[in-house]
Image (tube, rainbow, N blue to C red):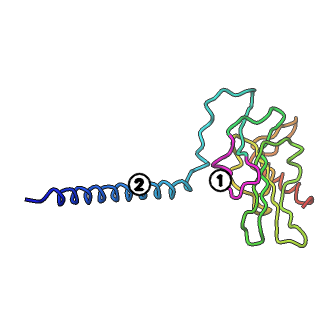
Amino acid sequence: PMSLVGQVQEVRMLLLYHALAVTAVQILIFSENRAFAKNINFYNVRPPLDPTPFPNSFKCFTCENAGDNYNCNRWAEDKWCPQDTQYCLTVHHFTGHGRSTSITKKCASKNECHFVGCRHSQGSEHTECRSCCEGMICNVELPTNHTNAVFAVMHAQRTSGSSIPMPYLPVLAWVFMLPLL
């Protein structure tokens, strides 16, 4: 038969092996959750369940000087845009190598959306691209060039006699902003 000291040592070893196994499983679970966290589908965001504060209310991803788009969208404040806003604005600053240095997203008025497009800072390797969009949490992506740094609207407020097909409105907004760039 095994001595009492031998039995105690065996129990200690079993407890140590158990603790190591539990730790290994926790590390595995944590690392898998962390790997999948970057794969959040921001396009599949469900409409909010809370009551709207006024007709045609909407929400935008919102952040101030975030370091990257994922963290901006992930930690965006979930609140309704003020009634005097109609669009979601995104301002993206990045280096000549495409590395984001600052991302700001917010609810915006029509006046704040007049200057969309990209501007390269003279004497520096930094570019600023601005875009505006209309619709519930529409500002998922970052503007990075003149193709996506646009003022995109979902519907136009038609006046009598207007016959511009809806799909062409973002293109027209881009064409009208091109001379400002």
Q: Residues within 10 Å of mark 2 (few under 14, many from 20)?
A: few
Image location of residue 48, percent across then percent down: 63, 34
Per the rendering, the mark at residue 26 is 2
Amino acid type shown at disc 2: Gln
Q: How many marks?
A: 2
Residue 125 on the magenta segment:
no
The tag earlier along the polypeptide, 2 or 1, is 2
Residue at 70% x, 36% y: name it: 79
Viewer-side residue, 153 vs 9: 9
Viewer-side residue, 76 vs 143: 76
Report which quarter residue 102 is drawn in.
Answer: bottom right
In the rendered view, would you say 118 is above or below 46? below
Disc 2 vs disc 1: which is toward the camera? 2
Q: Secondary structure beneath disc 2?
A: helix
Kindly report the distance in space between the C-alpha atoms of the residues bearing marks 2 and 1.
24 Å
Residue 72 on the magenta segment:
yes
Residue at 21% x, 56% y: name it: 8
Per the rendering, the mark at residue 110 is none
Question: Which image quarter is the N terminus in?
Answer: bottom left
Residue at 18% x, 59% y: name it: 5
Do callouts 2 and 1 mark residues in contact (Cβ within 8 Å)? Answer: no
Viewer-side residue, 36 vs 45: 36
In the rendered view, would you say 129 is above or below 81? below
Image location of residue 145, percent across then percent down: 77, 63
| Mark 1 lies on residue | 71
Report which quarter residue 135 is drawn in.
Answer: top right
Question: Which image quarter is the C terminus in?
Answer: bottom right
Q: Which residues are magenta?
A: 63-77
Q: Tell me if 150 is positioned left or right of 79 in this view.
A: right
